[in-house]
Amino acid sequence: MSSDADIRSGQRFIGARQEVRESYWRRLDWVLLISALLLSGAGAVFVWSASRADLASEDPQYFLNRHLVNIVIGLGLALLVSRLDYRLLRAYTPLVYGASILGILLVYTPLGATIAGARAWIRLPGGFTLQPSELAKVAIILVMALILAEKRDAEEEPRDRDVLLSLALAAIPIGLVLLQNDTGTVLIMAAVVITMVAVSGARTRWILGLLVAGATAAVVAWQVGLLRDYQIARLTSFLDPESDPTAAAYNATQARIAIGGGGIFGRGLFEGPQTQGNFVPVNESDFIFTVVGEELGFVGGVVIILLLSLILWRGMRIALNATDLFGRLVATGVVAWLGFQMFENVGMALGIMPVTGVPLPFVSYGGTSMFASWIALGLLENVRVHEQS
Amino acid sequence: MSERSTLRLIVLGVLLVSLVGTLLARLFYLQIVAGEEYRAQAASNSTREVLTPSVRGLILDQRGRPLVANRTSLVVFVDRSVLMREPDDGDAVLLRLGDALGKDPKDIGERLMPCGSEGAPPLPVCWDGSPYQPVPIAKDVAPETALKIMERRDEFPGVTAQLEAVREYPAPFDANLAHVLGYVGPVSQEQLDEQGDSADPARLRARDLVGRNGLEAEYDSALRGVPGILTLAIDQAGRVTGTVSESEPVAGNYVVTHIDAHLQAVVEQSLQEAVKQARSEGNKAPTGAAVVVDVRNGAVLAMASFPTYDPKIWVGGISTTDYERLLRTKALSSNAVQGTFPPGSTFKVVTTAAAAREGYDLYGTYDCPADYTVGSQRFRNFESAGYGPISLAQALEVSCNTVFYRIADELWLKAGGLAANSQSPDPVAETAAELGLGQQSGLDLPNEAAGLVSGRLEKLQTWEERRDGWGADAKSGFAEVRAKNPQLADYYTALAKENCVDGFRWRNGDAINASIGQGDTSITPLQLAMTYAAIANGGTLYQPQIAKAVLSSTGEVVQEFAPVVRREIDVSAEALEFLRASLSGVTYEGTGRIPFEGFPLDRIPIASKTGSAQVFGEKATTAWYASFAPADNPKYAVVMMVTQGGTGSGTVGPGVRSIYEALFGVSGDTVDVTRSVLVGGEPSDALPVVRPDGTPVTPDPQPGGVLIDDTTTMDDTALSGAAPDGTAGTEDPTSVLGDYDPYGDWDGDGIVDEQFDLDGDGIIDEQFDLDGDGLLDEQAAAAAMGVSP
């Protein structure tokens, strides 16, 4: 990205303001947007199905209503982000980064809350909670894209210094999230970081080094007891859930029963015995895929996976067609994030990934996750809109 | 943009595609390949069944009178698994419970033991149900007692009391019917295991009661019904989240029987009177049976067995005391269906039919000497003196043995004598089989005995089964018997030896014995009734049936049981006609005459045959009276027998008369069909009506009917008819001691009590060498084995 390009886009911005406004809706990736909307809409149904029986005496629509509000907010955030000026996006990056670090640190103040063994939430007034680590994913993507794409438009690969810097900046939020015991998010962040370093064109040794480092870290953490027993239990119980009496194993077993029992066409919406009987814990958020699998069966599960894949494919296209490295890296980071998070979430429900509490993008209940997903979508659309034709 | 970047982006794409592929493959595996298994797990995970027990169906008599009904009872249950957690294995609880219920704590303890566990009493006292189910230990508990138990939970851990539907026996006319009705008991673990995993709502469940014997067992699936099942969806905390499905209980169907309760009561009463009569004459008369069948369709109208018991003792589980008494009195099994007895002279109809089939002239003249000699052995007449030349009909009337001895001997010789092999004809045995003797009749009750008919093949088979045992016995020399009675031991040894060596030979002595229903021949009273029914109805051997139909609890016909013809017997119509005529002659002027003196035989001719069968080791003969009536248009066959009861005519004849009086409405010399115990004088054609609320419509109280209390006439008749008057031809052993009467006086020396030592030498032998071959008879050997140590 040259200064010329900046000027060109600036000229276009100033001189052809009308044109940009007109072309915004035209240039928007509608397939991407509609896929996300369909997923969120379907997610609302699943959240309703999963939660309506949970609170027999309270408002059965509690989760549904909040979920719908979250979708609307998320959609607004996405449109906002997608319309931001590209350069402003870069300018805001340090701000976003700083804010997310602050947010994660707030978790350790009395405002913080522990949910499902992870101290990852901040209480907000009105009963709302915020999960800063979700937003930290956005910060990591933006800051890494900023550093890795900086000052080297003409060069083949990012300088080692820049790679190192970007890794260091990413390591701060990742380390903090790790301290919160949010293993699932850490894994996804790590995958995003490695993918972005790779796509930035950094030398191969960086990628190999990161993979080796990651693997070593995992083994060391395991061996020296950095991971607590329950974390290990969560991570390994999926291999043989029947042998393990812990809660994580129970979740995995019940999830498998729910999905396995769904068959080809499922039990029918609101008819899944596992779902309606609350046998699968947190099935409105982390285990929402069990609702799909049980009530809509193989067909429903495939549709949801394909809708998510559609988002990944459009994201991939946007990354390929991006006119500058920053845009490509942002899009790549988002695709890696959504892709790995989907795999981790669905894989967990299907019993091929460890039970770590990550939500299914666009589908799961959870405000922060929903906002983060839509912000990610907004980033993709932003890159897309600013593609040079 | 560098190529490396683009390339790596594409690698990312490929990676993502493979991840998505992995998810889809796993989804396919879970939902489509392994789906069924998970579906089952989900089902057991998330639903609970709440059962509303179905009401077990009633058993009705042919008029709709309930023979078995239901009532509620406060039943006390003990959960053994809770009891076993007590420090003293619940001994203290049992003591307190025994005190509260007024029962022996040991008795309660025994009822709790799972069958087969160490120290458990035998079935059915031990707990045969699922080991995890509470065991019912007391029924009809007073509400105060139940309340006391329920209030003091800490003193009575694992003890509960609840209202249960239990069987009730309304016993119309005091009809007992215990052996026909059977009883219910807890479903056994084997039955549950056998059933396997079943989703059938009618499947057996751990706390179900099932029929264990009699009609209750035979028609269990019809009677049981289907419980109402409320399937609740429950959540992971066990809270009910909704209703998955709901079904109303379906009450069990009603089984309508051919039994007429009023007739049944008369039959039971008559049988008891017969036993009483026999005992009053000094006979042991331990057991007896009586059967009434409709010869036109095989319907069993009444069936009684003596001794009997009160079926109520099974309700809520039987106690050790009751069960031991049942065993001691041998009241548990039906002598009509499960007991087999030598038929004696009632078997002569078979020999007659066999003779007809072999071309003997039914209207010819036959010599009836006082004895019949084969080789060195004289076979004496049994029920009559020597009559000289008589007709075959007269031979039946006076029950002349020697006529049948001769026929049997001639048939034996004709078949090849001792040279005959297993392929040779054996007309008497074959005719017996043709007439349904020695084989299960197919009655719709469990555990029917087949019995046995003596014959060449039968003898060979018995020998093949038992010769090793005989051989071993001969070698052992009966040491235990020898210690007490060396002569008896010698005799047993010689007998065993002979049997082992020679016991397969069908000798003419065997054939002669078989011709009068002796030897190994042993049949059930029901079989004999069906045989007589076939003779009566012109040759149709029916399968006897107790159940007439199955109705729903609201009265719709579910199933009607049509008469089942086993076969048209291969006996000529002429021979059957001859038998009917001759047998009615038996009642007019033969051995069956005395009990029917004064009976209006002109209007209701009775065809009958008496029998007094000897059983080895028993002093008094087994008394039989087999009959059908009216002889000219037969409707009913009636058979009654009492073991060690004396003579057929004297002991059971009066009972049979009582039954016919009740059937035809006979009082003194008058016949009034309206006084018949059968409403309208005939078995009911129609099925009983059941009201929509499930209550059957019954014809009672029936004006003008013979009430069961009104038995004085029958009683008197029975006793007077049997009174010994010394008349020739009577079967009474105390009055007839002629040389034709081998009973008690084989050697004709006028001394009765010698049957085991006929020649007075102190060795029991002669009577067991009927074939005169100098060797002891295998018939006696069979019995001797039973007596052996």
Image (cartoon, helix red, strand yellow):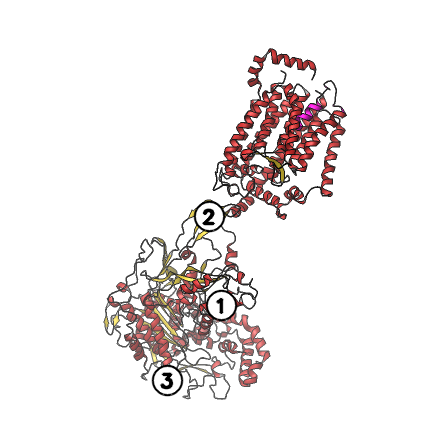
Q: In the displayed structure, would residue B698 be above or below residue B247?
A: below
| Element assignment for label 2 | strand
Using the image, tell me which numbered label, if any, was put on residue B231.
Answer: 2
Residue A45 in picture, x, y percent from top left: 51, 34
Label drawn at residue B96: 1
What amino acid is labelled 2 in the image?
Answer: Thr
Instruction: State how far apart marks 2 and 1 are (Cα).
Output: 39 Å
Assign a secondary structure to mark 3: loop
Label disc, if present, on residue B734 of the rendered structure: 3
Q: Residues within 10 Å of mark 1 (few under 14, many from 20)?
A: some
Q: Residues within 10 Å of mark 3 (few under 14, many from 20)?
A: few
- Residue A236 lies in the magenta stretch: no
**Could you say which is closer to the camera, residue B160 or residue A80?**
A80
Q: Is residue B251 visible?
A: yes
Residue that appears at 43% across and 58% down:
B220
The image quadrant of residue A111 is top right
> In the rendered view of the protein, which quadrant contains the N terminus of chain B?
top right
CA distance separating discs 2 and 3: 73 Å
Residue A88 placement, left or right of B531 = right
Left or right side of B236 for B708: left
Quadrant containing the C terminus of chain B is bottom right
Instruction: Name the element at disc 1.
Output: helix
Q: Which picture quadrant has residue B496? A: bottom right
Residue B189: horizontal and vertical position, in percent?
Answer: 52, 59
Q: Tell me if residue B693 comes above or below residue B4 in the rendering.
A: below
Q: Earlier in the sequence, mark 2 or mark 1?
A: 1
> Does label 1 lie on the same chain as label 2?
yes
Type of amino acid under label 1: Arg
Which stretch did the figure color magenta?
A139-159
Whether A147 is among the magenta residues is: yes
The answer to whether residue B140 is visible is: no
Instruction: Write the residue at 58% across / 20% down.
Output: A83
